[in-house]
Amino acid sequence: MKYSVSNWIYGDEPLEKTFVRLSKCGFDGVELMGEPDHYRVDDVAELCKRYNLQVLSIAGMYPWPTTGRDLANPDPEVRGRAVHYLKKCVDFAVGVGAPLIIVVPSAVGKTHPVGDTCDDKAWEAAFRREWDHAVESVREAARFAEDSGVLLAIEPINRYETYLVNTAEQGMRFISEVGSGAVKLHLDTFHMNIEESDPIAAVRAAGDLLVNVHIADSNRQAVGRGHFDFVGLMKALKEIGYDRALALEPLPPVPDPYVAMKMKRYAEMWDTYAQESINRLKEFEQAM
């Protein structure tokens, strides 16, 4: 397996500073925040060469209520902008050599469908409508991605941050409805700890659909600071033949991750969390 860190957790930190940290800690690569306009492809390539790192994935960013990042939105213009954004991420991934992009089918922070959902019937109708919109949006983006060889990895997110795809089973059903070989599954240990009755069984069920994994402990801190079963995870990954990246996403203990990444008083934890996490994971992997 390969090890990386998703750089969105470092906020506006200069990219070279992130590369220095990851190189020093023994990482294989980086997961870049999916903001194509923030980077120059040539600059990223130069940093990868200088620090012997790869771009192992792109973390698509789908904040709510940002206009144009909601693939499930009932407004076709909003969905169109979201698909356009995802296509830009595909081009960016090709440029930096990343094999996949993480896709959240509905915006993060959007915890219910748009419109009146005050009763069961209205909720079910709105949910089905937005599910179908998301399937079609991802299908369109997948047709574009198929020509480039870039994969789109669907990420289930916990119910407190989004509502459409929360579990691995829902993610696999969504992928089946899209019906493209370019659409696979991404899992996140933090979200699984909330949503899955058995996270390790969910990994086994995913099998070869699984192409990327986010790593944070049960409290979203570094590996070993919570109670997630990482030994069981590593065993399950080995059983399904997983040999791709584990992308770390540990965050300081504050309620809002988007606030945490901007707070300079937590900056000293970034090196500590990165080193602690990769050390523990490599120990578990070597013990298998």
Image (tube, rainbow, N blue to C red):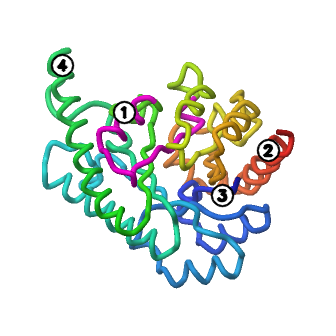
* Label 3 – label 4 distance at C-alpha: 42 Å
Marks 3 and 4: CB-CB under 8 Å?
A: no
The residue that disc 3 covers is 4
* Label 2 – label 3 distance at C-alpha: 15 Å
| Amino acid type indicated by mark 3 | Ser
Q: In the drawing, what numbered circle is on residue 118?
A: 4
Secondary structure of the residue carrying tag 3 is strand
| Amino acid type indicated by mark 2 | Glu
**Residue 117 picture quarter:** top left
Query: Looking at the picture, how far across and down is residue 257, in whole percent?
Result: 53, 45
Secondary structure of the residue carrying tag 4 is loop
* Label 4 – label 1 distance at C-alpha: 26 Å
* Label 3 – label 1 distance at C-alpha: 28 Å
Secondary structure of the residue carrying tag 1 is helix
- Please provide the residue range marked out in magenta: 169-192
The residue that disc 1 covers is 173
The residue that disc 2 covers is 285
